[in-house]
Amino acid sequence: MKAVIAENLVKTYNKGTVKALDGLNLDVEEGTVLGVLGPNGAGKTTTVRILATLLSPDSGSATVAGIDVLKHPDEVRKLIGLSGQYAAVDETLTGWDNLIMFGRLYHLSAKETKQRAIELLEQFALSDAAKRPIKTYSGGMRRRLDLAASLIIRPKVLFLDEPTTGLDPRGRQDMWGVIDDLVKGGVTLLLTTQYLEEADHLADEIAVIDHGKVIARGTSDTLKKQVGGERLEIVVENEHMDSVKEIVARVSGSAINVDEGLRQVSAPVTTGSKALIEAAKMLDEKGIHPLDIGLKRPSLDDVFLSLTGHVAEEKKDEEVSVSKGRRRGK
Amino acid sequence: MINFISDAAIITKRQLLQLSRVPELLLFSTIQPIMFVLLFRYVFGGSIDTGQPGGYVQLLMPGIFVQTVAFTLAGTAVGLAADMQKGLIDRFRSLPISRSAVVIGRTLGDGALNIVVLTAMGVAGFAVGWRPTSSLFEVFLGFVFLLVFGFAMSWIGVLIGLSVREERVATNATFIVVFPLTFLSNAFAPTTGMPRPLQYVAEWNPVSTMVAACRQLFGLENQFGATAGSFPSENPLQMSVIYMILIMAIFIPLSIRKYNNAAKK
């Protein structure tokens, strides 16, 4: 049973000049996690906003938990939770106030609401901060409270729009832990992210989107296979570059890739660790001590690059994310 | 319907909770109008000869009351723009609640704040010599007029706040709306001193009719600012009621529609 289906969604902004979605199709199997992966401006947020009833598409259709999003938005709202980049909480109020307010707005009884608030604060390690205004929370705590607010009714389908954008590495780890637990609890989750490793870590399946369309779909492994298998990578001092090129070519038997700037030589290999040992032995025989040597499985960055022909670059006018230091589209 | 009322009540309660969590909010929104009372009373009061018994303060107080409730527009607009900016409106819109509960709750909350503010101003005015001479019922009715007018203005604020979508822009935008509206009126000085075209504008300005109506309800002869013969200055009570109904009839539906389409960039 599909918990989410989107068919041929088209959405344009500014009187048709900006095409946010260009015939987007996706679905999420009940109880699974779909990671929607793409750079800023690819259409991730627009997709979530349409599925969460906040936005109407120009054309196309969508169902959530079997209910037509466009025809019965009120019914859909009773079953979904939305959190992330564009959902929020009242910062002047305390964490407790917020959960109570949202619980009551979901029409839970006063008693149920309190019960649920206590549970969620506990679950997200916010019990101690419950009586403090959100203003005093760290970025990670805010996101967790935001997520808690979207879980008050135990939604059937949860939408998380870039849940870790802007968080520091520690906050991101915490958030991943929280989301992992939710997933174990069996919630159907549609998660958008521009962090390739995040999709890899959290999602059962990944839909890569670019320019408002899904351009590839599959498990993280399938996508990686599409790009090719493992690569042998060796980094050495400049004077040894030529010998290393020779060694890598011999071990791999395929075309090698040389990055003079990084002083790195790499090539695809099929024999795994055997190739690595072989290369290390050859280097040793020649008395070369590599600065770095290893087998690299293709990252999702590589996937993106090979699928789109361009790096997962952020659009300049969009929000700038924190992970500037991340390796991109090598 | 029951849900609609309770949803709106929760939103109103949220605002009152905010006031209790950040008491400075209430403090400053009360101090500001009191400051106006004192400034106008003692800075201009001495140099303006009104010919009214009791002096300038009798004419001033209705003017400042109306100005203050007109400014409800700004509070609503800025509050909603902030909610919009922070994504709170998106969250509300993803909840299974009535499509108008959030904005109605907001305008009612801002209206409730006016009760506190008007009370404080009334006390301050009394302290500096303001003495209504009409019956208790008329004074009460005057305050009801003020509250309803504030509520109506608040709906204009909803539309502005949801349209500009950003707190700082909302602050500036409302400033541009409210200042001319309150000063291009009979609130602080007679309109008869203005250039003729401006006099027409001032006469028909809802703020002027409200000020004139309040002066009448607080027992003053409305000679200050009324340009003889025009319908609004002759019939300020009726005209104010018409304006309040008109503003609400136009801006309530527009604002609710805006809220429902709020995400459509």
Image (cartoon, coloured by chain):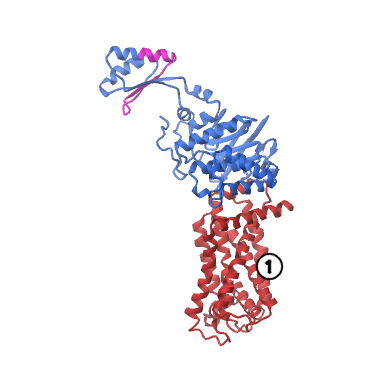
Residue A158 placed where, x, y %? 61, 37
Q: Which residues are magenta?
A: A257-279
Going by the image, does A95 lie left or right of B140? left
The answer to whether residue B231 is visible is no
Give the total of numbered labels.
1
> Residue visible at 45% across and 36% down?
A169
Residue B37 falls inside the magenta stretch:
no
- Quadrant of residue A128 within the rendered picture: top right
Q: Tell me: residue A126, above or below residue A283.
A: below
Residues B39 and A159: in front is B39
Quadrant of res A5: top right
Mark 1 nearby-residue class (10 Å; few <14, some 14–19, many ≥20): some
Observer able to see residue A203: yes
Q: Is residue A119 above or below residue B183?
A: above
Amino acid on which the number 1 mark rests in the picture: Ile
- Which color has been applied to chain B in this rendered view? red
Q: Position of residue A100 (x, y in %)?
A: 63, 47
Expressed as whole percent of the image width and height from the top left, the position of residue B52 reads: 58, 86
Residue closest to the far front: A128
Q: Foreground residue, B101 or A269?
A: B101
Q: Which chain is blue?
A: A
Q: Nearer the viewer, residue B71 or A173?
A: A173
In percent of the image, x 29 and y 11: which residue is there?
A: A285
- Return the chain for callout 1: B
Residue A261 magenta-highlighted:
yes
Task: Write the residue at 57% across / 70% down.
Answer: B120
Q: Quadrant of residue B13?
A: bottom right
Give how far across and how far down residue A329 sits, in percent: 42, 31
Q: Could you tell whether B190 is left or right of A311 in the image?
A: right
Q: Is residue B103 above or below residue A85?
A: below
